[in-house]
Amino acid sequence: MNNVSDELIELQTRMAYQEDTITQLNNVVTQQDADIIQLQQQMRLLAKRIDELSFTQGDGSEEIANERPPHY
């Protein structure tokens, strides 16, 4: 009977460790998701700034060198 009790304790211990691991992994995935969202926003902002800079003249003036068509 003691053997069954030991096996039950072993299974409960393993389950507790697995639950802890799952919680830790979930925290990592949640943080990575937030990081990815932030990086995507930064990338969109940088792409927009690069796009805007490509349409201005190099002398620092605000005139548009290549004016976009109105449908953009």
Image (spheres, rainbow, N blue to C red):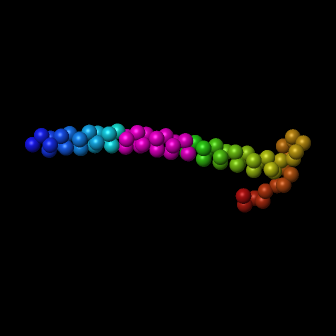
Find residue 35 and report its image quarter. top right
Q: Where does the image place residue 24, in percent across and percent down from the top left?
A: 40, 39
Q: Which residues are magenta?
A: 21-36
Q: 64 or 11, which is in the foreground?
A: 11
Q: Where does the image place residue 5, in percent across and percent down from the top left?
A: 15, 41
Quadrant in the picture for the N terminus: top left
On the picture, is 3 further left or further right than 16? left
Quadrant in the picture for the C terminus: bottom right
**Residue 50 among those drawn in magenta:** no
Residue ID at (79%, 46%): 53
Q: 67 or 33, which is in the foreground?
A: 33
Find residue 13 and report its image quarter. top left
Q: Where does the image place residue 56, in percent across and percent down from the top left?
A: 83, 47
Residue ID at (87%, 42%): 61
Q: Where does the image place residue 42, in percent across and percent down from the top left?
A: 64, 43
Q: Residue furthest left?
A: 1
Q: Main secondary structure of the magenta part?
A: helix
